[in-house]
Amino acid sequence: MEIKKNYNLSKLNTFGIDVNTDFFAEIKSENDIEELFSSPEFKHYEKIFLGGGSNILFTKDFHGIVILNKLKGIEITEESNESVSVRAMGGEIWNDLVLFAVNHGYWGIENLSLVPGTVGAAPMQNIGAYGSEIKETLLNVETFEVATGKKKIFNNEECELGYRDSIFKNKVKGKYFISAITLKLSKKENKNVTYRALKEYLENNKIEIHNSKDISEAVASIRNSKLPDPKILGNAGSFFKNVFIKKDELQKLLLEYPDIPSFEEKGLMKIPAGWLIEQCGWKGRKLGNVGVHEKQALVLVNYGNATGSEVFNLANQIIKSVRNKFGLELIPEVNLI
Ligand code: EPU
């Protein structure tokens, strides 16, 4: 396997930030993993595992090794009358796995249509959209331990999946390389159309759901109507996480801001970060080469030749103004390097 030196990453991050890494390698097989994990460059340098580059902001050149997961393959490993287990390699594009599922008529990940990124990155942040999370269908995650090169399988519980969170972002950050995942999908109708924006879209367009593909297509058109295409406008989807607060904290905020939207989730109240940012006057604002998207205030965009620091500075200004106005703390969803 070739380890490239001084490699440009602008095409490998959806923000389109022009930075270099000292070393770069692509993993295309399990043999590559063994070879790479025992090489001196790998052992001694700081490492970043990259999938679609859709959840990362490079603020400077990287002095270490970037490893791109290019492991490919999708297969059915078990099947019954009710369900099917689908194993997908980490380098597959997440939406290709969604299309595989809906084209076979399987249910479970249709609400996650068009979530950017790769299969290997999906459990890292427990991807979620339109009322669904990968947590609901994930059976297990296959990994290689970085220090030893040994294979380890994490079952659903061991992944400690939370809102945009997992053990791979916390306790064992950087310690495991995700090679494959297996999902349990349903062959029986199992639709989830309670998320407000999805429900309204289906009602307004008089769409009846006959199969998982119908949901997938509806979700894809909602996403396309408000989220910018990174091929045209550099971005990494939601830059911040939504904010979760206790009910009594919400009651206090409501006294001053009676219009504040909130959604109950798992005993807490979710306040949409997009609303908070919009209320601070950021939506659609442009600052030099960077800005806040005009249709979804959670998305920061690169209008051209932005540096990672410009995006980072904008993010910090937004955090500050939300803190000053509402006393709430926005936390980036995107990994900052
Ligand atoms: N809102 C505003 N102004 C905005 C944006 C949103 O007021 O500019 C408020 C509205 O009240 C709206 C509510 O936020 O009803 C929810 O908006 P939306 O349905 O667009 O969802 P979100 O909470 O802003 C989350 C995910 C998205 C996912 C959507 C749809 C996070 C951080 N983001 O956004 O995920 O597509 O739900 O389910 O949880 C991503 O992670 O990159 C991503 C795009």
Image (tube, helix red, strand yellow):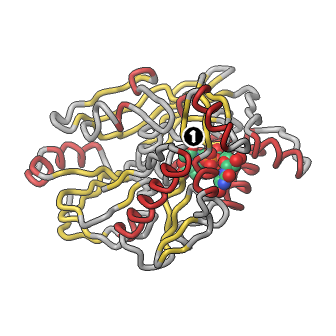
Q: Position of residue 141 (x, y in %)?
A: 40, 31
The quarter of the displayed image where residue 133 is located: top right
User: As drawn, is 19 to the left or to the right of 184?
Assistant: left
Residue at 8%, 51% in the rendered image: 40
The residue at label 1 has a CB less than 8 Å from ligand 1: yes
Which amino acid type corresponds to the residue marked 1 in the rendered image? Gly
- Label 1, residues with CA under 10 Å away: few <14, some 14-19, many ≥20: some
Quadrant occupied by the N terminus: bottom left
Residue 96 makes an appearance in the image: no
User: As drawn, is 200 to the left or to the right of 188?
Assistant: right
Quadrant occupied by the C terminus: bottom left
* 284 w.r.t. 78: above or below: below
Residue at 58%, 70% in the rendered image: 285
Identify residue for label 1. 128
Q: Nearer the viewer, residue 4 or 290?
A: 290
The quarter of the displayed image where residue 5 is located: bottom left
User: As drawn, is 151 to the left or to the right of 113?
Assistant: left
User: Which residue appears farthest toward the right when viewing the image?
Assistant: 206
Q: Position of residue 223 (x, y in %)?
A: 67, 55
* 51 w.r.t. 124: above or below: below
Secondary structure category for the residue under label 1: strand
Residue at 61%, 31% in the rendered image: 269
Q: Position of residue 317 (x, y in %)?
A: 44, 61
User: As drawn, is 266 to the left or to the right of 147?
Assistant: right
Residue at 46%, 54% in the rendered image: 319
